Image (tube, grey):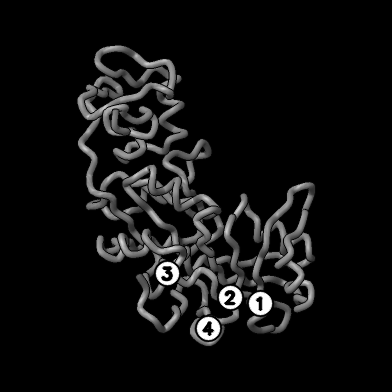
Amino acid sequence: MTEEEKGERIAKRLARAGLCSRRDAERWIADGRVSVDGKKLDTPATLVTEASLIMVDGKPLPTADRTRLWRYHKPAGLVTSHKDPQGRTTVFERLPDDMPRVISVGRLDLNSEGLLLLTNDGELARRLELPSTGWLRRYRVRVHGTPDPAQLAALEKGITVDGVTYGSIKAVLDRQQGANAWLTVGLKEGKNREIRKVMDHLGWSVSRLIRIAYGPFQLGLLASAEAEEVPTKALKEQLGSKGGDSERKPGDYKKAEQKVEKKGKTQNAPRRRPV
């Protein structure tokens, strides 16, 4: 029997259809919102095939669209969530009207800005979030204080802060401007508020954090709050790669990434055309 005949887990199918993440799908099943062939499910381990009639909230599962990916320039002040218990404005409330339902690849916290990848495929989002993908996430970080290059270099060996162990962080001092400094920081995992916590631990509070790249995908000259779809050909090429330029050191981009302008303006990107 082929893998296709055996089927796939229902949570994975829902994620592939772009309705939600696999974790959300498991919650939907636990809440009794999903049925297969007329039977309400109580476990995400259920296998389904192309012949299965899948219903969510009483409606048939939509036909899966082709896998699509967008680059989005997240402004500061938006929550990376579909719903916020505190009533704050979310990224998804500010997306262009012509975009389909999408989910984010990872998150940027409320006060962070820059590149956020969005996709209609929950499985792709999950894959790109895994550290095993090997893709470096790069940031421009403004801190208050005078960073010590030796301390920055030591971060490549990892660091433990308040009992949480963080992996290798590549951090380079770009320039000191009075009481503030700009850094280029690269990491492959990105735990919750990792850069802010690590820098604060070292005595340098973060006043601005901008993600400029996620693996081979660049923020480029994308304007704040603007979304642009990655061409299908480019997406296939990058997903078939092993991280593209992810192994380049943050310092390699020092000349290519020009001054970050005053707040509200887009920073210049690496000179090469973004994917």
What residue is shown with label 2?
A: 250
Amino acid carrying label 2: it is: Pro
Q: Residues within 10 Å of mark 4 (few under 14, many from 20)?
A: few
Q: Which residue is mark 3?
A: 219
Quote the CA–CA distance across marks 1 and 3.
19 Å
Mark 1 or 2, nearer chain start: 1
SS at mark 4 in the image:
loop
Task: State the separation of the CA atoms marked 4 and 1.
Answer: 15 Å
Contact between marks 1 and 2 (CB within 8 A): the answer is yes
Asked if the residue at tag 1 contacts the one at tag 4, i.e. Cβ–Cβ closer than 8 Å, the answer is no
Of pointers 1 and 3, the one earlier in the residue sequence: 1
Whole-Å distance between the Cαs marked 2 and 3? Answer: 15 Å
The part of the image, by quadrant, that contains residue 231 is bottom left
The residue that disc 4 covers is 259
Which one is nearer the viewer's eye here, 110 or 58? 58
Sequence-wise, the earlier of marks 4 and 1 is 1
**Secondary element type, mark 2:** helix
- Residue located 29% across and 53% down the image: 68
Instruction: Tell me which amino acid carries mark 1.
Output: Val
